[in-house]
Image (tube, rainbow, N blue to C red):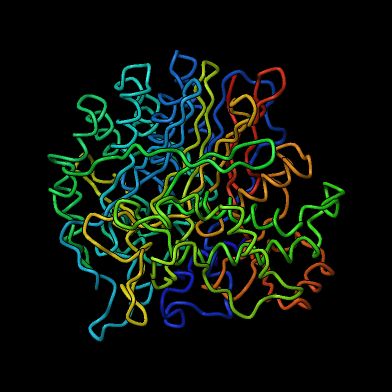
Amino acid sequence: MQRCLIALLLWSALGHVQPAAALDLNQPEEAVPEAAASAPLARAPAGLRRAVASAHPLASEAGRRILREGGNAVDAAVAVQAMLGLVEPQSSGLGGGAFLVLADRGALTAWDGRETAPATVRDDLFLDADGQPLPFEEAVPGGRSVGVPGVLRMLEAAHRRHGRLPWRRLFAPAIESAEQGFPIGLRLAGQIAHDPQLARDPAARRYFFDADGRPWPAGHRLRNPDYAALLRAVARRGADAFYTGTTARAVVQAVRRAPDPGRLATTDLARYRAIRREVLCYPWREVRLCGMPPPSAGLLVIGQVLGTLEASGAFTPTLAPAEAPWPATFLHPYIEAARLAQADRDAYVADPDRIPAPAGRWSRLWDPAYLAGRAARIGPRAADEVPPGRPDPQLSWASDRSGEVPATSHFSIVDGDGQVLAMTSSIESQFGSRRLVNRGVGRAGGFLLNNELTDFSFAPQRAGRPVANRVEPGKRPRSSMSPVLVLDAASGEVIATLGSPGGPPIPHYVLKALIQWRIAGLPLQAAFDAPNLAPLGPAVPWVLVERDRWPAATLQALRELGHPVREVPLTSGLHGLVRRSDGRWDGAADRRREGTVAGD
């Protein structure tokens, strides 16, 4: 546990354009700075008609309360996110962004609440005076890294179209907990205690530390009257209470008065709009995997890896017995397929409103002939180099190596009346930019701001060619968040909803669960429990595997095939629900964190 917490100190960008400046290649734990905490879930609830699987017991209970009061899944999502912003502030909240994938009585919708860059940013935002990329640990804390938050505007837009209960009722659980206080959990307490930047912000220091500067311990009841007051205003006036007026001015003040000030303006907040996008679906055997299009790269990576593995003939009986970790004979093609997919991601995926899709459609990256060509590059040993493919000869972007730090949260909800959703939200790094907005209601409390702009490429071009994921005014940075709905291909019925936090490894956490569930035949909870791995492609030189979960012989076999394996605490946070043949749902929550399933 202690070593997992020490990993929280590490701030790598997973290999920006000049990785040596920000990344110690001898410290692979820098890629996964997230604390683990054993979940109290002894047995996942089963046979539920309506359910919530989320990263914190209070959040799951908040969602269940709304469902019991007659709310639907979208209503419950508002309550869950409001509560997570209080009890899991290091991972998500009103100061961040989110993606939501919704099935509403058969109709699929993708809601994009990703943050945007301020209108006055320039493409040299993360370059120093000499034109070199800043070290990641210098770019994150402060105002420079803060994007325009999107989660609340997105939830409001989704609720207007799909909600059932009045908006004002959905914040009651979080308001009550903020006013009465909630007990700090082990994971939050550990992250407060081991974050070197948090106490440097005066507002954050007043909230997360006592009068003598000591971090609040686990079990301390933490009240947040400022957050409660903000939620009351949002409940009355809608998202405008956040994006205009007192709160908007407080956000801009926190950004512009930071030691490393940013360019955010009140006009950026007032102009923010959530986007309703067309769901992207990958057909895989008897199901369709449906999720977010860009600016998320998650489902594109998932589909590319699965398609490349199918083309290579990797899915064989070697996955049996189901309970065993994957053998090296399967891991090798998986790792190589993942590296190929990551190379395409780095080259082609960015904000779709600014960057064209290859050949005019993102599904071009899934074309069977294209993936067969990619699969043909998988040899008997690890490839020395993995270049991107050429899905569109007209596109000539430079590959970027921007990264994400895994402070994120995922929840899945079903309501028993036709709505099923998967939502992943984030403030990027743990505690985001380390800037806490306090509106002056009470001495301490408030909400944290994101550092999502560090998901852009720090360098706008390489070798004279522009990078697709470069910083531009109003642009949305690329993300790995992968909320997924699984649909039966024949009936169109949703049979599962799942996702995970975790930064760049997110697609691989979801892929592991999908393969173990659909190919190996494990129950969803057992699929979540299975060992993690994360081949992160050209930007990171190692294959990360979950410490103490893989046989030594398997790891040695991978090394002999040329894969530089490193064991680290890969702390996924998978949460999901799976539909049974009787129409009811079984829940699953990752035991590596504090998540729970609540339902009836």
The residue most toward the top is: 70
Q: Residue at x 37, y 77 (%)?
A: 135
How many numbered marks appear?
Answer: 0
At which x and y percent is residue 243?
19, 40
Of residues 339 and 124, which is closer to you in this image? 339
The residue that appears at 15% across and 61% down in the rendered structure is 120
Q: Position of residue 219 (x, y in %)?
A: 51, 43
On screen, residue 85 above or below 417: below
Q: Residue at x 29, y 38 (%)?
A: 227
Quadrant showing the N terminus: bottom right
Q: Is residue 147 left or right of residue 56?
A: left
**Residue 47 place in picture, x, y as percent:** 69, 21
Choose top left, top right, bottom left or bottom right for residue 132.
bottom left
Residue 241 location in percent, x, y?
19, 34
53 relative to 470, above or below = above
Viewer-closest of 203 and 295: 295
Left or right side of 197 for 392: right
Q: In the visual, does 329 lie left or right of 483?
A: right
Quarter of the image where the C terminus is located: top right
